[in-house]
């Protein structure tokens, strides 16, 4: 889920790092490494899908096996009402938090605000444990929770945090020296299972070399958008967000894509949702749409500057055909997973959710300020 008050920093090409590294290790180049000693350097955990969101199992304080939504579009760890049991070293900070989320529904719509209290406690994911600030949510007006299952854990950076400067979970692992490399990977599968790799680049999971791009902030980057492997939109501002179940873009951009792909569409206006555009296509004829990474302008600049971290040639990563259906309406008519809205915090922002992560290994490299992409191994 993206944060409604999303802040995007300097909108410029970064040829090396997005910022001076603050975490261990200070620099990890994206290159092939010998595989014989990799297995001891990272932790792999399985993610499971429910209602188009993805979850991992965490221990928070004395609460065991909490199913938390994995969200690269936010930064904070929030446990739903009634699920947090303080551990032996738990500290009540006597601070409160308020955080507003977008794309809270499985169709990509919806917004909501969560309030609660902050504690410091231990958080364990797989074999890795960090001392961490944890938010315990208050129940909503109707007694229910905004976030599904037991809560949410953010894997974005401090830019998105609402916890008074407290580090996000993975950043805490880096700062506390719990990982070999300050990077994590995510790949979502076709069988309701996904994998998250902490603290290393797992080359066994993908084919070829990573295509890499600099980031603007965690996890936003410039890309081009390709239809049938031909660029139709240049320099799109994209936030990659596993906590969003669909793909949302600016209304004008989405209409342009729908027209080019011969997708029927409907534009609606409302006081609550603003302007939205929804597309419809034959279920057995999904379009071939993807992100061209890095953007052509960034790839050209990287080549000029002899960047070691950013790819000098762009590659197109298409949304898999079986991810295109948001809803089957019958009679070979399906609602597209891509939709348009003018309700984004930035008018030119795309929020590209979990459908994009299927069949792709995405490396989130905090130390270098890059994102890397490669097709997963079969």
Image (cartoon, rainbow, N blue to C red):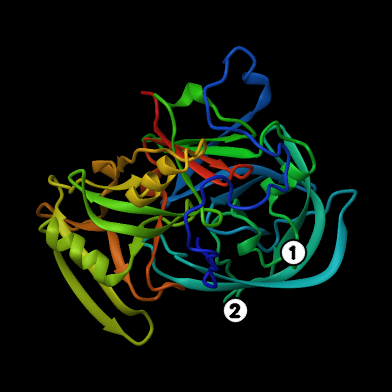
Residue 255: image location, x then y, percent: 20, 67
Residue 349: image location, x then y, percent: 40, 66
Q: Which residue is at the front of the view, 38 or 366?
A: 366
Q: Which residue is found at the position 42% from the left and 72% from the top?
A: 344
Residue 264: image location, x then y, percent: 12, 64
Q: Which residue is found at the position 75% from the left and 60% from the top?
A: 166
Residue 203's place in the image compared with 239, above or below, is above
Residue 111's place in the image compared with 338, above or below, is below
Earlier sequence position, callout 2 versus callout 1: 2
Q: Residue 263: in sight, yes or no?
A: no
Q: Is residue 98 left or right of residue 272?
A: right
Q: Which residue is at the front of the view, 356 or 135?
A: 356
Quadrant holding the C terminus? top left
Question: Where residue 13 is drawn, which disc sits there?
Answer: none
Residue 272: image location, x then y, percent: 38, 83
Q: Residue 23: in sight, yes or no?
A: yes
Residue 319's place in the image compared with 147, above or below, is above
Q: Secondary structure under badge 1?
A: loop
Q: Which residue is found at the position 62% from the left and 34% from the top?
A: 28
Q: Is residue 140 left or right of residue 174?
A: left
- Spot the residue most to the top: 36
Question: Where residue 165 is drawn, which disc sits there?
Answer: 1
Label 2 and label 1: CA atoms lie apart by 28 Å
Q: Name the image quarter holding residue 110.
A: bottom left
Q: Secondary structure under badge 2?
A: loop
Q: Name the image quarter holding residue 81.
A: bottom right
Residue 104's place in the image compared with 318, above or below, is below
Question: Where residue 141 is drawn, which disc sits there?
Answer: 2
Q: Is residue 230 left or right of residue 70?
A: left
Q: Name the image quarter holding residue 346.
A: bottom left
Give the foreground label among 2 and 1. Answer: 1
Please say if the residues under marks 2 and 1 sit with CB atoms less than 8 Å apart.
no
């Amino acid at each position: 889920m993206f944060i409604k008050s999303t802040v995007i920093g300097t909108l410029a090409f970064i040829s090396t790092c997005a910022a001076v590294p603050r975490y261990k290790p200070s620099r990890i180049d994206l290159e092939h490494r010998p595989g014989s000693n990799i297995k001891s350097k990272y932790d792999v955990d399985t993610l499971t899908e429910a209602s188009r969101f993805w979850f991992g199992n965490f221990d928070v304080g004395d609460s065991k096996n909490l199913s938390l939504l994995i969200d690269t579009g936010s930064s904070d760890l929030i446990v739903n009402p009634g699920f947090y049991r303080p551990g032996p070293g738990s500290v009540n900070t006597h601070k409160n938090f308020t955080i507003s989320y977008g794309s809270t529904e499985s169709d990509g719509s919806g917004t909501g605000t969560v309030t609660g209290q902050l504690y410091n406690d231990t958080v364990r994911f797989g074999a890795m444990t960090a001392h961490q600030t944890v938010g315990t949510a208050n129940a909503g007006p109707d007694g229910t929770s905004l976030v599904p299952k037991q809560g949410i854990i953010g894997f974005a950076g401090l830019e998105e945090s609402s916890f008074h400067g407290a580090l996000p979970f993975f950043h805490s692992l880096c700062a506390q020296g719990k990982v070999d490399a300050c990077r994590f990977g995510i790949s979502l599968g076709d069988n309701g299972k996904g994998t998250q790799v902490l603290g290393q680049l797992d080359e066994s999971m993908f084919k070829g070399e990573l295509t890499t791009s600099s980031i603007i902030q965690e996890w936003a980057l410039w890309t081009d958008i390709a239809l049938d492997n031909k660029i139709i939109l240049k320099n799109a501002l994209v936030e990659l967000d596993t906590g969003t179940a669909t793909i949302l873009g600016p209304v004008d951009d989405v209409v342009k894509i729908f027209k080019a792909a011969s997708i029927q569409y409907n534009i609606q206006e409302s006081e609550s949702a603003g302007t939205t555009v929804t597309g419809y296509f034959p279920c057995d004829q999904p379009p071939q749409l993807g992100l061209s990474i890095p953007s052509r302008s960034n790839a050209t600049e990287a080549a000029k500057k002899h960047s070691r971290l950013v790819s000098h040639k762009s590659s197109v990563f298409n949304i898999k055909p079986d991810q295109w259906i948001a809803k089957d309406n019958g009679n070979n008519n399906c609602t597209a997973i891509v939709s348009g809205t003018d309700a984004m915090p930035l008018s030119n922002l795309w929020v590209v959710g979990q459908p994009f992560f299927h069949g792709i290994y995405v490396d989130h490299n905090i130390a270098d300020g890059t994102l890397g992409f490669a097709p997963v191994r079969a």
